[in-house]
């Protein structure tokens, strides 16, 4: 139970932290509502879970593989800059809705792409996650501890996904064109910031 609660709290902290996914979540959720926000987060959750499985299976080599990390990092930077351009463009145009809504499949794929193109989660899992799971004194996590940990993490993540989707869907009724332009502008700047941050990490990796 202690391990489950630790994982549950860690999941809430992980997904509540501001990031590129949060910025895109606000944009798409305010535009298209509950299901768009939900599928975006579920896609991101799939990506995070995949990184967790890779880390816990013992793929620490991936975290030390510089070419792979550079490839993922560059892919992530390009994706973030593309999303930033779209957000700033909508802020300039003052768009509140789109002529054609993106499908749930598109939201899900974008969430997964944002998560998988960011190599930082594997460092998180190899560090914080693996430390908690290995708190029973073993050098490596046993299958039962891994199952309990992932269950707690996924439960809190799913709870957060539905909570945020509902909150954003409820808040749509108060959205005005001016407010939406402001959200797009702030989210665009945030996405640029996270792209630059990821770029700095890659430069540090090359110089190390």
Image: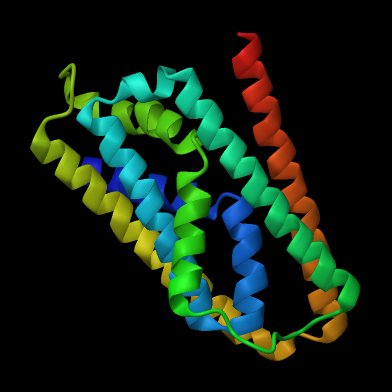
Instruction: Mark yes or no: residue 103 visible.
Output: yes
Q: Position of residue 157 (x, y in %)?
A: 38, 58
Q: Is residue 24 left or right of residue 138?
A: right
Q: Is residue 75 above or below residue 207?
A: below
Q: Is residue 168 left or right of residue 161?
A: right
Of 9 and 98, the residue lying toward us:
98
In which image quadrant can residue 73 be found? Answer: top right
The mark total stands at 0
Q: Is residue 12 left or right of residue 147?
A: right
Q: Position of residue 150 (x, y in %)?
A: 25, 47
Quadrant (top left/top right/bottom left/bottom right) for the C terminus: top right
Q: Position of residue 20 (x, y in %)?
A: 62, 52
Of 207 and 55, the residue lying toward us:
207
Q: How is the image coloured?
A: rainbow
Which residue of the protein is positioned furthest toward the top in this rendering?
208
Q: Residue at x 18, y 16 (%)?
A: 139
Q: Is residue 124 above or below residue 152?
A: above
Instruction: Mark yes or no: residue 132 visible.
Output: no
Q: Residue at x 22, y 52 (%)?
A: 151
Of 89 and 150, the residue lying toward us:
89
Q: Position of residue 155 (x, y in %)?
A: 30, 59
Q: Residue at x 22, y 25 (%)?
A: 134
Q: Is residue 131 above or below residue 35?
A: above
């Amino acid at each position: 139970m202690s391990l489950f609660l630790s994982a549950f709290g860690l999941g809430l902290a992980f997904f509540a932290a501001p990031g590129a996914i949060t910025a895109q979540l606000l944009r798409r959720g305010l535009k298209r509502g509950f299901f768009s926000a939900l599928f975006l987060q579920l896609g991101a959750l799939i990506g995070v879970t995949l990184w967790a499985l890779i880390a816990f299976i013992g793929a620490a080599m991936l975290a030390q593989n510089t070419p792979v990390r550079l490839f993922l990092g560059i892919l992530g930077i390009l994706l973030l800059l593309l999303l930033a351009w779209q957000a700033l463009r909508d802020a300039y145009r003052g768009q509140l809705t789109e002529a054609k809504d993106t499908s749930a499949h598109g939201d899900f794929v974008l969430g997964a792409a944002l998560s998988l193109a960011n190599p930082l989660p594997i460092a998180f899992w190899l560090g914080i996650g693996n430390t908690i799971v290995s708190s029973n004194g073993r050098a490596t996590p046993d299958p039962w501890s891994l199952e309990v940990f992932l269950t707690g993490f996924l439960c809190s993540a799913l709870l957060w996904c539905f909570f945020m989707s509902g909150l954003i869907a409820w808040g749509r009724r108060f959205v005005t064109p001016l407010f939406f332009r402001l959200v797009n502008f702030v989210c665009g700047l945030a996405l640029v910031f996270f792209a630059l941050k990821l770029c700095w990490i890659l430069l540090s990796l090359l110089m190390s």
